[in-house]
Image: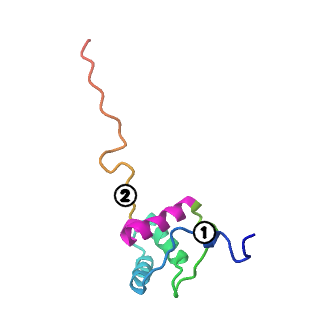
Amino acid sequence: MLPRCWGPAMLKKYIVRLSPDERTELVRLMSVGKAAARVQTHARILLKADQGPDGPAWIDAEIVAALEVSRRTVERVRAALVTEGVTAALYPKAADAGGTDLPEPRGVCSDW
């Protein structure tokens, strides 16, 4: 049987621990208010998930409820921070970085 303190927070693979400089930069990004909505949301996720001495250490369920995002979004932002850094967590790459979502143009029918 697992101890009572054992729970979902104990099983986290990607633990967010922001340095004071990272935390200051994220707070500044939020206070300026000029960043895109998605960037601001990702910054809020990181600030709430921060397990460091200055962070609130919210669990994913609390972040999901407060920020109205999916649990998967919180997990993705956590993973991006730990594996790739703050910039990757704030500005995720496009799914198809090389092209557009538009279909290829069709040829013109000249049989008329």
Residue 45 place in picture, x, y as percent? 52, 71
Q: Looking at the figure, which quarter contains the N terminus? A: bottom right
Q: Is residue 73 magenta?
A: yes
Q: Give the range drawn in magenta.
A: 72-90
Q: Among all residues in the image, which is located at the extreme left?
A: 110
The span from disc 1 to disc 2 (Cα, nearest Å) is 27 Å
For mark 2, what is the residue? 93
Where 77 falls versus 19 (above or below)?
Answer: above
- Which quadrant does the C terminus fall into? top left
Instruction: Look at label 1 and name its amino acid.
Output: Leu
Residue 69, given in percent of the width and then of the height, sits at 57, 62
The answer to whether residue 70 is visible is no
At 39% across and 85% down in the image, what residue appears?
21
Relative depth, front residue between 52 and 99: 52
Q: Which of marks 1 and 2 is nearer the N terminus?
A: 1
Along the line of sight, which residue is nearer the eye, 109 or 21? Answer: 21
Element type where label 1 sits in the image: helix
110 versus 101 height, above or below: above
Neighbour tally class for label 1: few under 14, some 14-19, many 20 plus, Cα within 10 Å: few
Q: Identify the image quadrant of residue 24.
A: bottom left
Return the residue at label 1: 11
